[in-house]
Image: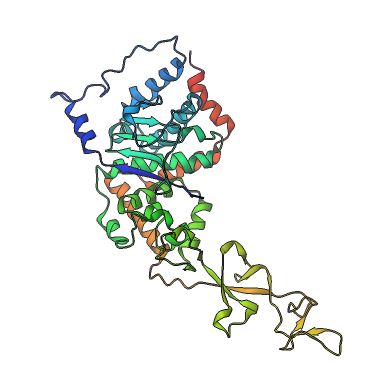
Amino acid sequence: MKKYFKYISALALVAMVSMSLSSCSEKGMGETIFPDVSDELDPNSYTYKFDKWLKANYLDVYNLDFQYRLQDNETNMYYNLEPATLTNAIDLAVLAKYMWFDIYEEVTGSKEFVKMYGPRILMLVGSPAINPQSGTIIVGLAEGGIKVTLLHVNSMNPLDIYGLNSDYFHTMHHEFTHILHQTKSIPREFQLLSLGRYDPINWQDRKSTVVHSLGFVTPYASSEIREDFAETCANYITLTDAQWERIWLEAGRGYVTDGNEDSDEMSNLNYYCFYYFENNDATKDENKKYANENQVVEQEDGTYILRNQYQRGVAPITTGEDGKRYDANGALCDAQGFVLNSSGARIPITVFEVEDADGIDGVQMLETKINLARNWFREQWGIELDDLRNAVQSRLQSFDASTLEDLRQQVYGQQ
């Protein structure tokens, strides 16, 4: 079964940028770069309230054309796409403003930053763009600093705020980072950190645990420098503390694989960060086994054991004069041949962490990347990255059904 991986992309469409610049008069831009947009909306239209809200909150404020009606000439004809439903388009429109535009207004103190540097077009597409050959799904596009496209809108659950955060809010901040670094370059120090470790072809075959150990926040971040930077910024802003704790844990671990790394089927590789010795016998190399993380239990003392796996006695198991069973080494055993402790309980199999032998301190690498991104936002844009993160996290934690209903009323409650 083909496994699909979500990713987001930035396209440097020089033709689009040139076209938008050539359309400007010698006197410069007027109130809008969309002169064909009529100020007159049809009050009898089924979408009148939504169109009125979009004009007042996106076009008039940010000079942004919010396109929710699918236009073939604005999409890649290679993909079989479908339009967004009106209901989901309304929900995502108010949520995008709440979790993206309003965030930057809160942090910068005005709407001018997004108005100046934000996209000119925000387009919604109902379905994802699926590439069956690479097994990837495009969930967002940023094109030449002009246009951001959000896809698979019809599958969204507007009340699943953390799902929305993963699929949409993360994409918004990722794409906006692309727009910003197309204006002011990614720090050179950042560009040098992971040279030689990017894989633009097979990034989707990399496991998240392994790339964390290599100093990447996601497999997609390991595809190339600009995606690494955008993913670092977007994930720092949108991931919760618990999600980051998991990344830090995995970034400090080592991993091994039991597959052939030269195989065409890299997705079939199994990676392990723990190992154990069968029957706790380390005297024979063949006794060394690897364990998936979900098989491992961390104990209160910080050591690890294998879930529901216990030491077996060394054959033969015999019955002593006292009527108890013993293995060949004299260890006390039960009727099934498992070794018992002095309390008569089975002894779990001890687990060890794989040595982190990739030559990279994943935790330090991620911390360095975040600090470089933090400094870039501060020095180049006068924005504190942590303020963006705090604003997003605050809204995530306080979001509920009443919040969504209040946002919807901005559209539905208009006269």
* x, y percent for residue 353: 53, 71
Residue 250 higher or lower than 230, as above or below: below
Front position in the image: 384 or 53: 53
Q: Is residue 177 left or right of residue 314?
A: left
The image shows a total of numbered marks equal to 0
184 horizontally vs 398: left or right: left
Against 43, residue 79 (above or below) is below
State whether residue 332 is above or below residue 294: below
> Quadrant of the rendered structure where residue 303 is?
bottom right
Residue lying at 19% horizontally and 30% vertically, measured from the top left: 21
Q: Is residue 117 left or right of residue 68?
A: left
Of 25 and 316, nearer the camera is 316
The outermost residue toward the bottom is 321
222 up-or-down from 324: above or below: above
Regarding residue 374, the answer to whether it shows in the image is no
Residue 235 x %, y %:
43, 49
Q: Residue furthest top?
A: 44
Is residue 354 in sight in this rendering? yes
Give the side of residue 126 with respect to residue 283, left or right: left
Q: Position of residue 290 (x, y in %)?
A: 55, 70
Residue for point 55% across, 36% down: 399
Question: In this view of the protein, which residue sits in the foreground, 85 or 97?
Answer: 85
Q: Where residue 369 sits: x, y (%)?
A: 35, 56
